Image (cartoon, rainbow, N blue to C red):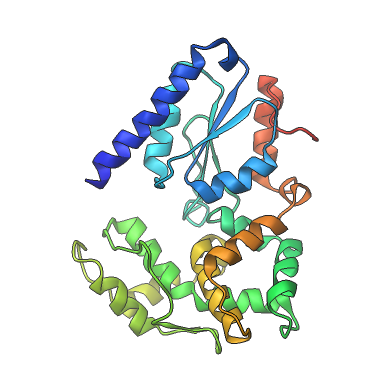
Amino acid sequence: MNSLKSYVDENIVVGSIRQQLRHPSGADKVWIIVEGETDQKLFSKLIDGPHVKFEFNPNGWGKIPLMKTVSELLKETNCILGIRDADFLHLKGKKESAENIFLTDFHDSEMMIISCDKAFYSVISEYESEENDAIIFREKLLRSIAFISGLRWINDSEGLELNFNGLGFGVFYDGQTVVLDEKKCLYKVMKRSPKKKMNISEEDVKSKIKDVSDLLNLCNGHDFQKAFALCVSCNSKRGVNDVEIGKAFRLAYRFEDFQKSDLYRQLREWSDAQEKVLFKNA
């Protein structure tokens, strides 16, 4: 059912862009396909050329439908780009070979922001007034979610069909001590994954990540935001959720920060080569 729905959503986007291409107003447009709404909110403020238009599936879709959409539309126009999460590609030392597909600098767009010291300082000063060293706290929090990140990596590498959708952290994460209960985490993911192809042990996960030091490419940004929200809530009179934290990070990330990224450099090279304006003020 999910694959059918994704196929339908993918074809709706393709059909919509094809229709616009046939109209005179579509001649100068550059379409950028992103994976979801939060990516659209982030990149639409950074990539703000006068003829840039973003498309995404409101229900969210993964890298395969995004890449298929770009590939299909490239048959008709070169002014179609895709920005996708790198996921574990950088960690594996791999690059994206598909035409007009660009990767985030780190695991995902959220991790790109989290990696930016200025953006991180801005958010932590708003929510964690008791935290003396923001960079040390960021490292501690990244290390605390390395286990679930390793579990995601195994799932990605082995195609185990583990279910992480809508996974809450409250059952297995202690925001006060910044510690993830690995046994509870593994049990919860296994229990909610009836279609899993095999069981995974704690030792399997620990072995996968034991030599990994690149936490910005290992860890999932949404997991980081959930853990961050739980930590903040422990020191706050009001509860804070990961959606609010995600919004705060997007607002804190400036165009000047984006200009320092590899993603910006690659998009700017494409923009110059195609003589298409992706950025108003660059």
Residue drawn at (26%, 60%) of the image: 160
Up-down relation of residue 130 to residue 167 (above or below): below
Residue drawn at (43%, 38%) of the image: 66
Up-down relation of residue 181 to residue 210 (above or below): below
Residue drawn at (33%, 79%) of the image: 202
Residue that protrudes farthest toward the front in the picture: 238
Q: Position of residue 58 (x, y in %)?
A: 43, 44
Up-down relation of residue 62 to residue 238 (above or below): above
Q: How many marks?
A: 0
Q: 246 and 180: which one is in front?
A: 246
Q: 252 and 116: which one is in front?
A: 252
Q: Is residue 214 at least partly visible in the picture?
A: no
Q: Is residue 248 at least partly visible in the picture?
A: yes
Query: Which quarter of the rendered picture does the C terminus lie within?
Result: top right
Residue that protrudes farthest toward the bottom in the picture: 177
Q: Quadrant of residue 237?
A: bottom right
Q: Position of residue 179 (x, y in %)?
A: 50, 85
Up-down relation of residue 264 to residue 128 (above or below): above
Q: Position of residue 50 (x, y in %)?
A: 70, 27
Q: Position of residue 1 (x, y in %)?
A: 21, 45
Left or right placement of residue 204 versus residue 281 in this view: left
Residue drawn at (55%, 89%) of the image: 177
Left or right placement of residue 24 versus residue 148 in this view: right
